[in-house]
C-alpha cells in the first residue's frame, strides 16, 4: 500500500515539475518567432509537387515561417472549405478558382488584401486586366500566380495522315478537318475523334464566351447582371456545337473518358483546352503536338480567360496574417511565375512578363498569350450551378432530342435565377 501511495505521489510530483517545462517549451517556440501557416489547394500532382518545392525555398529564405501544404480531391474541395473556414479552422492561405470568388467573398471566407504590396493601383499596373474579377467593392480578395486562356491542341502526326499541315484557322475548316480525321468501326463507334466536343474539357467556355460572341451576341450585359444569349445568335452557337456530335460526328461526349485523355492516347486529332494542359501533355514524350489560336468565325476572334488565385482566410490575424501576406507576395513574384509556367504550363499573371518576346513567340505558349489579348473572363456568381446549366442544355438536345431554342431558353432562365439570387442576398 505504501509503495502504491509513493508511486502516486511521485507521479504527481513529476507532472507538476514537468508542467513548467512544457509551458516553457511552448513559450520558447513562440519566442523563437516561428509562425506556422497552412496552405490549401486541390490535388493536381504537378501543382502539388511544385508547391512542395516552392514552400521549401520560401522557408529557407524565411526561417521564422513554417508553411504546411494540404491538398484535397477537387470534388470535395468546396465542401471542405465550407465546413472548416466559418469555424476558424483550415487554411490561412487558400487556392481557389476565380469563379468561386463571389461565393467566397459573400460568405465571408476571405478578407480583403491590404498593405503596400496589395493596393488596387499596384495590382492593376502589374497584372493582366482579367485580375479585376477578384475585385469586390474596391478591394482585391485574391491574386493569381498564373492565368489561362484557350487554344486548339492538334496532333501533328494525325493531321499529316489526313493530308493537313497546320491547324484550322476558321471553325468551318475545323469542322471539315474534324470530319476527315474521325475514324469509326463497322458499327459506327468512334475509333478516333477528329475534333473533341467534351464540355467538361473547356468546351462549355467555348460556347459561352467564344461562339456566342462570334455569332453576334455577348453572353451577358456589361455589368454581368443579365443573360443575353437567349437569342438567335445564342441558339446558333449551341446548335453549332451540338451538331458536331449529332450531325458532323467529329467527336462524342465521354469518348475515352474525355478529349484530353484521348489526345494523350493518340486517338484525338484536335481538341480545345487551357494552357494548364501543356505540362501534362509534355510528359507524353511520343506525343507530337502543336497549339494554335482558336478558330475565327465571321472574322471575329474571341477567347475565354480564367485563373486560380490565392487568398487569405477571414480568421487569419496577427503574426499568421503577416506571414500569409509574405507567402502570398512570394507566390505572385515573377520568379515563381516563371517556375509555374515551366512546370504547369500556365501563363504568368504579370502582364509585362507574360507578353515578353520569349513567351509570346514560343510555339506552344504563344497562342495562349495572344489569345489573352481578346479573351473574356466570365463573371460567375455560382460557377458550379452556371456550369451545370450549360451542360444540361447541351444534354437535353443531344440525349433527349429537345429543340435547341427551347433548351437554350431554359438554360438562360436558370442562369438568370442564379444571378438574381446572388444579388438578392447581398
Image: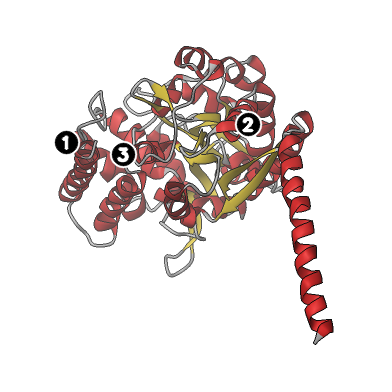
Q: Which residue is mark 3?
A: 381
- Residue 422 is drawn in which quadrant? top left
202 sits left or right of 336 in the view: left
Secondary structure category for the residue under label 1:
loop
**Residue with the most extreme front position:** 2
Secondary structure category for the residue under label 3:
loop
Q: Quadrant of the C terminus?
A: top left
**Dot 1: within a 10 Å radius of its alpha carbon, few (fewer than 14), some, or many (20 or more) residues?**
some
Q: Residue at x 29, y 56 (%)?
A: 395
Determine if residue 156 is in view. Answer: yes
**Dot 3: within a 10 Å radius of its alpha carbon, few (fewer than 14), some, or many (20 or more) residues?**
many
Q: Which residue is mark 2?
A: 323
Q: Nearer the viewer, residue 260 or 327?
A: 327
Q: Nearer the viewer, residue 397 or 164?
A: 397
Q: Residue at x 65, y 50 (%)?
A: 45
Classify 66 as above or below 389: above
Which label's residue is closer to the chain start, 3 or 2? Answer: 2
From mark 3 to mark 2, how far is it between C-alphas?
30 Å
From mark 1 to mark 2, how far is it between C-alphas?
50 Å
**Mark 1 against mark 2, which lies toward the viewer?**
2
Secondary structure category for the residue under label 2:
helix
- Residue 36 is drawn in which quadrant? top right
Q: Residue at x 67, y 19 (%)?
A: 358
Q: Which residue is mark 1?
A: 231
Q: Nearer the viewer, residue 374 or 317?
A: 317
Determine if residue 198 is in view. Answer: no
Q: Quadrant of the N terminus?
A: bottom right
Amino acid at each position: 500500500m505504501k509503495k502504491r501511495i509513493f508511486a502516486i505521489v511521485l507521479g504527481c510530483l513529476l507532472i507538476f515539475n514537468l508542467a513548467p517545462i512544457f509551458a516553457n517549451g511552448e513559450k520558447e517556440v513562440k519566442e523563437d518567432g516561428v509562425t506556422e501557416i497552412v496552405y490549401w489547394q486541390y490535388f493536381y500532382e504537378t501543382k502539388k509537387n511544385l508547391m512542395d518545392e516552392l514552400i521549401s525555398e520560401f522557408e529557407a529564405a524565411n526561417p521564422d515561417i513554417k508553411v504546411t501544404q494540404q491538398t484535397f480531391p477537387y470534388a470535395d474541395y468546396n465542401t471542405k472549405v465550407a465546413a472548416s473556414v466559418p469555424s476558424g479552422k483550415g487554411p490561412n492561405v487558400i487556392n481557389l478558382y476565380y469563379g468561386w470568388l463571389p461565393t467566397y467573398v459573400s460568405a465571408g471566407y476571405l478578407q480583403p488584401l491590404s498593405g503596400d504590396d496589395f493596393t488596387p493601383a499596384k495590382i492593376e499596373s502589374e497584372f493582366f486586366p482579367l485580375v479585376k474579377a477578384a475585385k469586390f467593392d474596391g478591394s482585391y480578395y485574391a491574386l493569381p500566380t498564373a492565368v489561362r486562356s484557350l487554344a486548339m491542341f492538334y496532333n501533328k502526326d494525325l493531321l499529316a495522315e489526313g493530308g493537313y499541315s497546320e491547324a484550322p484557322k476558321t471553325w468551318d475548316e475545323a469542322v471539315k478537318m474534324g470530319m476527315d480525321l474521325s475514324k469509326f468501326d463497322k458499327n459506327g463507334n468512334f475509333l478516333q475523334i477528329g475534333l473533341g466536343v467534351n464540355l467538361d474539357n473547356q468546351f462549355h467556355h467555348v460556347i459561352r464566351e467564344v461562339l456566342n460572341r462570334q455569332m453576334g451576341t455577348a453572353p451577358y450585359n456589361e455589368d454581368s447582371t443579365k443573360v443575353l444569349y437567349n437569342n438567335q445568335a445564342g441558339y446558333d452557337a449551341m446548335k453549332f456545337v451540338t451538331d458536331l456530335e449529332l450531325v458532323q460526328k467529329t467527336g462524342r461526349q465521354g469518348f475515352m473518358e474525355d478529349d484530353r485523355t484521348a489526345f494523350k492516347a493518340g486517338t484525338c486529332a484536335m481538341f480545345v483546352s487551357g494552357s494548364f494542359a501543356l505540362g501534362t501533355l509534355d510528359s507524353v514524350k511520343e506525343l507530337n503536338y502543336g497549339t494554335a489560336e482558336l478558330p475565327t468565325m465571321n472574322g471575329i476572334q474571341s477567347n475565354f480567360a480564367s485563373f486560380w488565385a490565392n487568398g487569405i482566410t477571414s480568421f487569419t490575424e496577427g503574426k499568421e496574417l503577416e506571414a500569409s501576406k509574405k507567402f502570398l507576395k512570394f507566390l505572385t513574384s515573377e520568379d515563381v511565375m516563371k517556375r509555374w509556367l515551366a512546370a504547369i504550363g500556365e501563363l504568368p499573371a504579370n502582364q509585362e512578363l507574360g507578353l515578353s518576346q520569349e513567351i509570346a513567340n514560343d510555339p506552344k505558349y504563344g497562342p495562349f498569350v495572344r489569345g489573352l489579348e481578346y479573351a473574356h473572363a466570365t463573371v460567375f456568381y455560382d460557377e458550379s450551378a452556371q456550369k451545370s446549366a450549360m451542360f444540361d442544355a447541351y444534354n437535353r438536345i443531344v440525349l433527349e432530342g429537345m429543340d435547341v431554342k427551347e433548351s437554350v431558353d431554359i438554360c438562360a432562365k436558370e442562369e438568370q435565377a442564379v444571378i438574381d439570387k446572388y444579388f438578392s442576398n447581398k
